[in-house]
Image (cartoon, coloured by chain):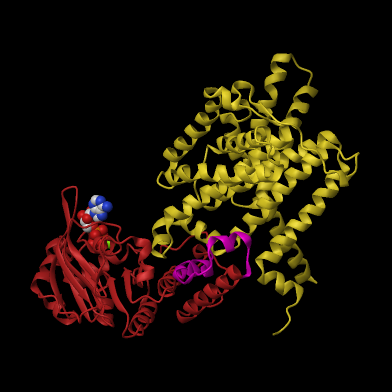
Chain colours: A yellow, B red
Amino acid sequence: MRRLGGSAALRRSTLLRSLGLVAAGAVVLALVSEGLGAYDNLELATGAYYFAVLAGLTVLVGVSGQISLGHGGLMAVGAYTVVLLIGNEQWALVPALAAAVVVTSLVGIPVGAAASRLRGPYLAGATLAFAVGLPALADKFPATFGGENGLTINPPTPPSFLGASFELERWEAWIACAGALIVLFVLYNLLHSGFGRALRAVRDDEIAASLCGLRVGRAQTLAFILSAGCAGLGGGLLAVVLQLATPGAFPLELSLTLLTGVVLGGLGSLAGAIWGAAVLVLLPSWTNDLAHSFSLSANVENNLPFAIYGLVLIGAMLVWPSGIQGGVRELGGRLRRLRAHRVAER
Amino acid sequence: MEPRELARGTGLSVHEITVSFAGITALEHVSVDVAPGEVLGVIGPNGAGKTTLFNVICGFVAPQSGALRWRGEPLGRIRPDRLAALRIARTLQGVGLFPHLTVLENVTVGATRFRRAGLGSALLGLPRSDRDERALRERARAALAQLGCENIDERLPGTLPYAVQKRVALARALVCEPELLLLDEPAGGLDARELSDLAKLVASLGSSVAVMLVEHHMDFVTSVCDRVVVLDFGRVIADDVPRAIQQDPHVLEAYLGRDADTGDGLGAEARATDARG
Ligand SMILES: Nc1ncnc2c1ncn2[C@@H]1O[C@H](COP(=O)(O)OP(=O)(O)OP(=O)(O)O)[C@@H](O)[C@H]1O
Ligand SMILES: [Mg+2]
């Protein structure tokens, strides 16, 4: 057998590429987290669990062509699963997070099966009802879910081999980033497999896809379940980072914000989900700072961040109609053409 | 028009199919057979029920009565996504390619029935999934090469000339190695040279493939079809060799009756409807 060069092996093996990506990501994130203080590490952790949710949502919306206004509700399922298992049942962190993925995926089965039969506004409506209804359950059964105040757990303790001075916030960032990297691994593999192509085919033309032998409803349901699992992991990580699950943490607004994140980042791309997560973490605090820098009356000042937020989103969509990642790709293409042009001129 | 007897266990047999949509009878007691190696043309004025007949065979439309048999087995209420496994492929009226998938990806989707690796190995990125992918892509490349579509693997369908898109669509149908090929207006929008290429291709499919094609282009139908079925208002009004069809008084009446002012029969109908692509 002929020995393959490194780059040829990379081209041939999806696994090598996805593992390489995860390893590079782990190194970068560890270095970044090393340089950040406690507050910024919490922001990093927030970005990481947003990424887990957005990556799953971008596959659902951008790749399989469905929509969900219910992903905030699915995050709630993951968060409550983790808090109940760690708080009441003394489960360890990793099995509790794994259980959050499993439980949320199971919840995703009927929702996904219903979703694959619905189109457009009906699908949006059904998932919307899910987002609104699910957190309300927590109020309905206060004995189990703690009502308005929710449930709390103890913070995770950094393992002793990391040293006594290892900050809690840094450890939380590591946990959330590990979850994000697992999502990256699985979804990268998915998108580079025949199944990813099948989802895109179903999105483009259901009739042609079924004539090619693809089971349209099944593919759509699977996409929903996978995306639900990612949202469950994201929600579980949120609960670990905040040590809290309350109904108020998962308002309808959250589901809408998540959709904004995937569209703004660039639909259907994992890199876009990274941009989206960064925007969701950074934009609110930037708009806040900006609003307060004008020194206006409290009334205006408190509402200004929302106005700026909206304006930035509208502006961004006008400048980058296919999201930030779309803009980056276009810029890359332009630079490449420019370089080719220079080479040709020589 | 007695339907010809098929050797037991071969070909497609459509028996006494009736379909109505809210009062309109789209097909009425339609019986048609296609044998392996045979090329059957289905013609008829607009709205005659040609596409509906294809939709019944593919399971998109449930007939009120009648039965279908494929290779001797009842087709029953077949789901469209099971057809490829039964070696039935169809091209859609127009082009019907996936607009955001490259040419190679489009054709690879057509090879879905050869997929072996499961979802688990796809999610974990296992070598088994990669090997499967390479095998499917090889099949797709071979199908594209068979149709003379080389060096366009990475192009998006929308960037290609219409005739090339139609060939890619045909490659996507052929890549699953069908034994029954349903072509809905394959000649629409093609020029004379492309038509003769298509005719050669259909002729070269071999004795194991049954072809059923809906077409308005009469010269093309005459040159490639062994037999022609004429539908009018959902009924079979003729079933014969092309030469006999062109002289059949019922057929001439069906076409002339509707475009009396365009004058010259089948030729005029063919030209009038060709432009729709
Ligand atoms: N899904 C449907 N619902 C209601 N009526 C339909 C449906 N599909 C077809 N029809 C009707 O059935 C009749 C046959 O239509 P069909 O599309 O089979 O004609 P066709 O022979 O393919 O015509 P064309 O040459 O225009 O493609 C028409 O009157 C059409 O309006
Ligand atoms: Mg038609």
* Nearer to me, B148 or A342: B148
Place of residue B204 in the rendered image (x, y in percent of width and height, measured from the top left): 36, 85
Residue at 63% over, 70% down: B127
Residue at 56% over, 42% down: A104
Q: Is residue B51 visible?
A: yes
Q: Main secondary structure of the magenta part?
A: helix
Q: Is residue B36 left or right of residue A203?
A: left
Place of residue B150 in the rendered image (x, y in percent of width and height, measured from the top left): 53, 78
Magenta-tinted stretch? B101-127
Q: Is residue B103 magenta?
A: yes
Quadrant where the C terminus of chain A lies?
Answer: bottom right
Residue B131 location, quadrant: bottom right
Residue at 79% over, 18% down: A295
Q: Quadrant of ligand 2?
A: bottom left
> Is residue A206 positioned above or below A72 on the image?
below
Place of residue A337 in the rendered image (x, y in percent of width and height, measured from the top left): 71, 63
Quadrant where the N terminus of chain A lies?
Answer: bottom right
* Nearer to me, B44 or A235: A235
Place of residue A310 in the rendered image (x, y in percent of width and height, measured from the top left): 64, 31
Residue at 71% over, 51% down: A181
